[in-house]
Image (spheres, grey):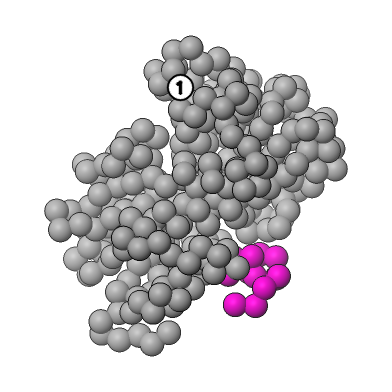
Amino acid sequence: MNLSGHTQPFAVLGHPIGHTLSPVMHNVALEALKMDAIYLAFDVHPDRLMTVLPAMADMGFRGVNLTVPLKEVAFRGLTDLDETASLVGAVNTVEFTPDGLRGHNTDGVGFLRALDESFACEISGQVVMMLGCGGAGRALALTCVRHGAARLVLTDIDADRIEQLASELRAVDPAIEVQSVEATPAAWARAAATADLIVQATPVGMKPSDTPLLGPEAFHEGQMLFDLVYMYPETGLMTLAREAGARVANGLGMLLHQGVRSFEIWTGTTPPVERMREALEARVYGKVEV
């Protein structure tokens, strides 16, 4: 990579940000396309985000991704929102346009593409349990309702957050069955056992020492567990689920496909998806030299 005074910057912002693998895949794509550009990562406190983003626009950044806990901050702070962001109430992709900052959300498309790749599964007709109803869980729950989920099971340590999301889901589809689960391990395990698909959307599992939120009694053969944590081949929760007979996937596929869509928004170009996948898998699994 040859940097120059003409090099165009892209970035991902979060707080913290050290875990991100977004630069791995995006820089491979930029290099493959021979673009004079670089993708960086910055730790930005939520209180400073809406000051930092306009400054980045002034500095010539082409585009920015946002990760926890900045997605909802950007949604509240930006006035120009694409339908994808408006529908889920969160922004994970910021486009710098001649008219200003425009917020998008590519998590939904990334999730659906990854689910199809991992399980050959569509959301329609599925009973889906959201383990965590924060930014990512909320966005994916709304995505599931819009794609025909039969029932949503909501869990979180914050009861008010559950009820808010339940109201939003019913506003999208008044007929959707929504189950709110009290925040106890036993209640979560009983609810999980009734689900076809469990989506782990909390930060638990980002540290190898983290204790899984569900035990083996929550899983059985035929279930699917999609853990949004992507920096390890298998989280502790994935191990428990797999040993109980469930099919499991980490969040690497979702990271890939939401990144592909972000790249398309910023550049108008489809990036080399398989090169990006190889780069991510090389980092997480040690499979491929890139």
Secondary structure of the residue carrying tag 1 is helix
Q: In this view, does 260 lie to the left or right of 185?
A: left
**Amino acid type shown at disc 1:** Leu
Q: Position of residue 110 (x, y in %)?
A: 50, 47
Rendered position, 71 above or below 28:
above
Residue at x 33%, y 79% (from the top left corner): 36
Query: Can you tell which quarter of the image residue 45 is in?
Result: bottom left
The part of the chain drawn in magenta is: 279-290
Asked if residue 200 lies in the magenta stretch, the reply is: no
Q: 71 or 254, which is in the foreground?
A: 254
Query: Can you tell which quarter of the image residue 280 is in?
Result: bottom right
Q: Position of residue 224 (x, y in %)?
A: 71, 37
The image quadrant where one finds the C terminus is bottom right
The image quadrant where one finds the N terminus is bottom left
Q: Is residue 221 left or right of residue 19?
A: right
Residue at x 14%, y 53% (from the top left corner): 99
Asked if residue 282 lies in the magenta stretch, the reply is: yes
The residue tagged 1 is: 169
Residue at x 63%, y 59% (from the top left corner): 231
Rendered position, 89 above or below 43:
above
Q: Where is residue 251 in the image (x, y as percent from the top left)?
A: 60, 50
